[in-house]
């Protein structure tokens, strides 16, 4: 099995406090999928199960998977059929009418293996619908943190720890896996940060700080300093910080 991305390490309660906007903004993707009663759906990268529940409420029969044991435990606490699994090594064979994914694929760096696993998991005629970070996603947030880490002498990884593709790169990988009717587009989505940039750094880049070796007792000072590097136009007149989110929304089919 391919090792999960070390930078995607989650605390479910912290995610609920600082990252609840992620599943909330994913509801239009559920509407795009339009789950039907009785459909068998795989939720790939289910997180704490918030959007999984929306699929279940529509009458679908859902299996939810996530690489994080903490997130799977949170989903199970909602009564969801959730299991720990690496999205880069899915073992399902022709089981699902649809696969759904929100804000998860960018943590799975072996995109070709993800695409192949999703293709295998679908029944003929099934569809894959979802959203992920796209090209340019959180560029300013990432730059501010990386510059602060470098200024403090930390050695950054030689490759990105997230995959934020263009529609063309994304579509090419999924076409190679056998999908047809691929539609993918970027959506600029300035996103309010309820806990400010500091909360975002803590929730979404703890894994990076683990990878480069930032001691726990120095992280708060570091994220405060990184926040000061952000452009002032990210702070609105309402005193709310907005992240420079860019989403890649997609849909495709496995021919019957």
Image: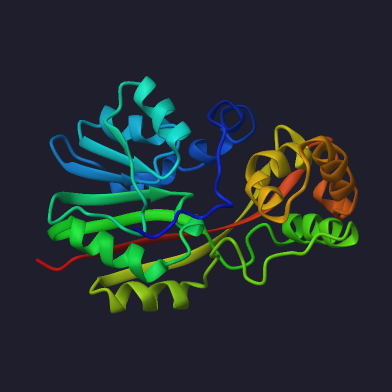
Display coloring: rainbow
Q: Is residue 221 above or below residue 159?
A: above
Residue 236 visible in the current orientation = no
- Residue 141 in the image, given as x and y percentages of width and height: 75, 54
Q: Is residue 33 above or below residue 162?
A: above
Q: x, y (%) of residue 198?
A: 78, 39
- Asked whether, in this view, residue 237 is left or right of residue 50, the answer is right
Q: Position of residue 240 (x, y in %)?
A: 79, 37
Residue 218 location (% of width, % of height): 84, 40
Q: Is residue 236 left or right of residue 28?
A: right
Say if 180 sits above or below 66 in the image.
below
Q: Which residue is depicted at the point 43% across and 40% down? A: 27
Number of on-image labels: 0
Q: Residue at the spot x=71%, y=62% of the render? A: 139
Question: Compared to 65, does 134 lie above or below?
Answer: below
Name the residue rendered at 34%, 58% in the picture: 1
Whether residue 109 is visible, yes or no, is yes
Front position in the image: 18 or 145: 145
Q: Quadrant of the C terminus?
A: bottom left
Q: Is residue 126 left or right of residue 132?
A: left
Residue 140 or 234: which is nearer the viewer?
Answer: 140
Residue at point 35% right, 35% down?
Answer: 52
């Amino acid at each position: 099995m391919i090792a999960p991305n070390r930078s995607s390490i989650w605390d479910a309660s912290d995610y609920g406090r600082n990252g609840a906007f992620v599943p909330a903004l994913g509801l239009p993707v559920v509407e795009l999928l339009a789950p039907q009663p009785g459909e068998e759906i795989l939720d790939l990268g289910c997180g704490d199960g918030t959007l999984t529940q929306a699929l279940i409420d529509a009458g679908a029969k859902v299996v939810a998977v996530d690489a994080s044991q903490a997130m799977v435990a949170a989903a199970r606490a909602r009564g969801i059929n959730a299991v720990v699994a690496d999205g880069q090594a899915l073992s399902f064979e022709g089981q699902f009418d649809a696969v759904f994914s929100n804000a998860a694929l960018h943590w799975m760096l072996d995109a070709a293996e993800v695409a192949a696993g999703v293709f295998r998991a679908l029944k003929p005629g099934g569809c894959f619908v979802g959203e992920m970070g796209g090209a340019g996603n959180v560029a300013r947030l990432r730059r501010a943190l990386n510059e602060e880490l470098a200024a403090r002498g930390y050695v950054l990884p030689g490759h990105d720890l997230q995959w934020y593709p263009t529609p063309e790169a994304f579509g090419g990988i999924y076409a190679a896996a056998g999908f047809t009717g691929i539609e993918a587009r970027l959506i600029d989505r300035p996103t309010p940060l309820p806990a400010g940039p500091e909360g975002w750094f803590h929730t979404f880049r703890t894994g990076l700080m683990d990878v480069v070796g930032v001691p726990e007792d120095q992280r708060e000072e570091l994220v405060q300093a990184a926040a000061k590097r952000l452009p002032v136009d990210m702070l609105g007149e309402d005193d709310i910080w907005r992240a420079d989110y860019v989403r890649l929304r997609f849909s495709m089919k496995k021919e019957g």
